[in-house]
Amino acid sequence: MSADSQVMRGPRAASTTPALPVHVAEPVVRALSADVEPARMSDWMDILQMVARFFPHADELELRYHLCNQSACFHAARVGGTLAGFMHIEPKPENHLMWLNMIAVDEPFRRHGIGQKFMLLAEQLAREASLPRIGLRVLAENHQAIELYRKQGYARVKETREGPAGLAYLVMEKQLVAGQPDRSASGAESMDPGWRRWINRLYYLVSIGSRSPLRGRRTS
């Protein structure tokens, strides 16, 4: 079965821990006016290109799944109309957790606080969803990023090894709110409604398709 037909036939089981980028978020040196808002379909190619550059172990079908079924979970940062970075988060109420799947800022826009804006937005969305924790995964050898997350209140939970190469990652979490999480919530809240998913899939196949920079990349 081709990748295109697999996307069209329905949701694919998504990985719970896709990789964070290998680059390190650098200290802020000066403010830069960046608007952070829900990503648009017209951002998808730029997002895929960024993933291709900064997430060497990202899986093509996994990204297609997220874009086509969880488009509302993507947020974009714009500077003067240019996509400067993106974030993908995924509510996991069954685990009382907001999972930060991906966050990346393009090179010309780093060291301006955009990454910090994404992190703060993720925490805000977690609180709004009554999720008491936020989690992420980072390469174990990325010591500078790990230290940055620690300074922002994240603590190591466990170490895992992923992919054919058995790369070591740290899972880190931050406690956000006290009290009981909303047990009435379900994982379905992170999914787009059915009509939106079909529109997303059609747009992906027609407008991106074979032009995807992740075309043919499989890591599992």
Image: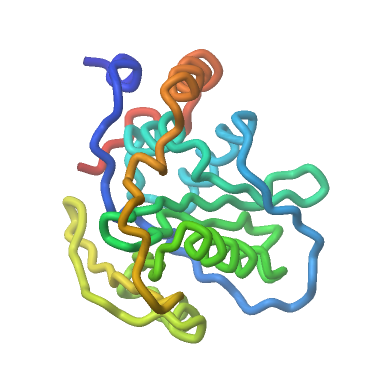
Q: Position of residue 36 (x, y in %)?
A: 69, 53
**In this picture, is 64 found above or below 89?**
above
- Identified at 38% across, 70% down, the residue is 133
- The image's colouring method is rainbow
- Identified at 78% across, 75% down, the residue is 30
**In this picture, is 184 found above or below 12?**
below
> Which quarter of the figure is the C terminus placed in?
top left
- Identified at 58% across, 50% down, the residue is 86
> Which quarter of the figure is the N terminus placed in?
top left
**In this picture, is 107 found above or below 50?**
below
Q: Is residue 11 at all visible to an observer of this figure?
A: yes
Residue 156, quarter of picture: bottom left
The reply, left or right, for residue 155 in relation to residue 43 is left
Residue 121, quarter of picture: bottom right
Residue 94, quarter of picture: bottom left
- Identified at 74% across, 78% down, the residue is 29
Q: Position of residue 159 (x, y in %)?
A: 21, 73
